[in-house]
Each structure stands twice: as structure tokens, then as C-alpha cells.
Image: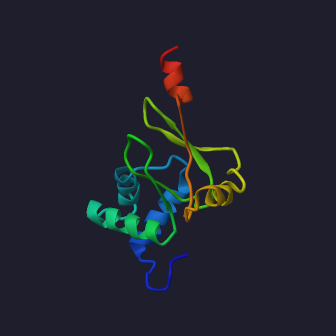
């Protein structure tokens, strides 16, 4: 789960478990509120630092959706996201990642492609219902 140089501390375990319980791609503040129910004395700074460590090690994904707060995802497999332009909600897209796109781009541009992400924009069902 974590590289050997990183211990799976009680705080990190709680953060991982709480993020894994949801599919809402929570912000750091939302993760903090979730973890505080289990560890009331944990600080916001501790949550931020551990989210950074967990994302750097690949235990979780850090998402930077355009125009909104950093979000975190326990699903580290390649997948795409859709973001509501009204409320900022982020959901997984049930579409397989494009096969061979990185290889094709590498050949066409001579770039060393390190990865890719795709974010679709739309209006979520709740916001759509609110506006009739």
C-alpha cells in the first residue's frame, strides 16, 4: 500500500479508510470532517500533510478539477471524471480510458508522456432539477 519509507500511521489509515468509503471525491476540508469523527484531536494541518504523502505515494489520487478545490479519490486506477459547473460535484465517468492515446501522442510529438487526465464538464442531476 505505502512504500517502506512511509509508515501507515493511525492518521493515515483513518484518512485512507474514510476516502475509500465515499465516491464523492472529497476536498481536504471534507476529509478532515470525516476523519475527526474517528480521531477528534487530529488537526487540519495533519490531514493536509498526510493527504499530500498519500497522493505522492500513489495510495490515493489527487484531483485538481478546473476552477475548484483539490479533491481526493481512493480509486487509483485510470479513469475519467465529470465535474458539475454549478456546484463543483465530481463523479467518475463510466467509460474506459482511451486505449493507446499516450503511445500515439508520444509518436506524434516526441514528448515523454507521463500520463493524462480527462475532465468532462456538465450540470449534475441535482443542479439540473433545481433549475427545472
Q: Position of residue 75 (x, y in %)?
A: 58, 58
Vertical order, 21 against 51 (above or below): above
Give the residue drawn at x 41%, y 77%: 9
User: Left of 128 or right of it: where is 100?
Assistant: right
Closer to us: 23 or 90: 90
Q: Position of residue 106 (x, y in %)?
A: 62, 60
Closer to us: 124 or 115: 115
Closer to us: 39 or 86: 86
Give the residue drawn at x 56%, y 55%: 116
User: Left of 86 or right of it: where is 47?
Assistant: left
User: Residue 76 falls in which quadrant of the image?
Assistant: bottom right
Give the residue drawn at x 37%, y 54%: 28
Q: Position of residue 64 (x, y in %)?
A: 43, 50
Q: Position of residue 78 (x, y in %)?
A: 63, 57
Task: Decide if residue 127 is in sight here.
Answer: yes
Closer to us: 125 or 103: 103
Task: Decide if residue 43 is in sight here.
Answer: no
Question: Going by the picture, which residue comes out furthest to the top?
Answer: 132
Give the residue drawn at x 51%, y 69%: 58
* Quadrant location, the N terminus: bottom right
Number of callouts:
0
Vertical order, 116 against 49 (above or below): above
Q: How is the image coloured?
A: rainbow
Amino acid at each position: 500500500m505505502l512504500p517502506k519509507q512511509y509508515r501507515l500511521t493511525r492518521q493515515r489509515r483513518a484518512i485512507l479508510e474514510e476516502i475509500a468509503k465515499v465516491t464523492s471525491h472529497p476536498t481536504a476540508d471534507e476529509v478532515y470532517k470525516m476523519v475527526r469523527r474517528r480521531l477528534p484531536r487530529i488537526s487540519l494541518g495533519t490531514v493536509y500533510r498526510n493527504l499530500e504523502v498519500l497522493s505522492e505515494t500513489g495510495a490515493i489520487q489527487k484531483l485538481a478539477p478546473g476552477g475548484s478545490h483539490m479533491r481526493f479519490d481512493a480509486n487509483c486506477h485510470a479513469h475519467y471524471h465529470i465535474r458539475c459547473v454549478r456546484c463543483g460535484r465530481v463523479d467518475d465517468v463510466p467509460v474506459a480510458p482511451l486505449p493507446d492515446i499516450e503511445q500515439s501522442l508520444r509518436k506524434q510529438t516526441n514528448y515523454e508522456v507521463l500520463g493524462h487526465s480527462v475532465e468532462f464538464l456538465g450540470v449534475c442531476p441535482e443542479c439540473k432539477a433545481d433549475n427545472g
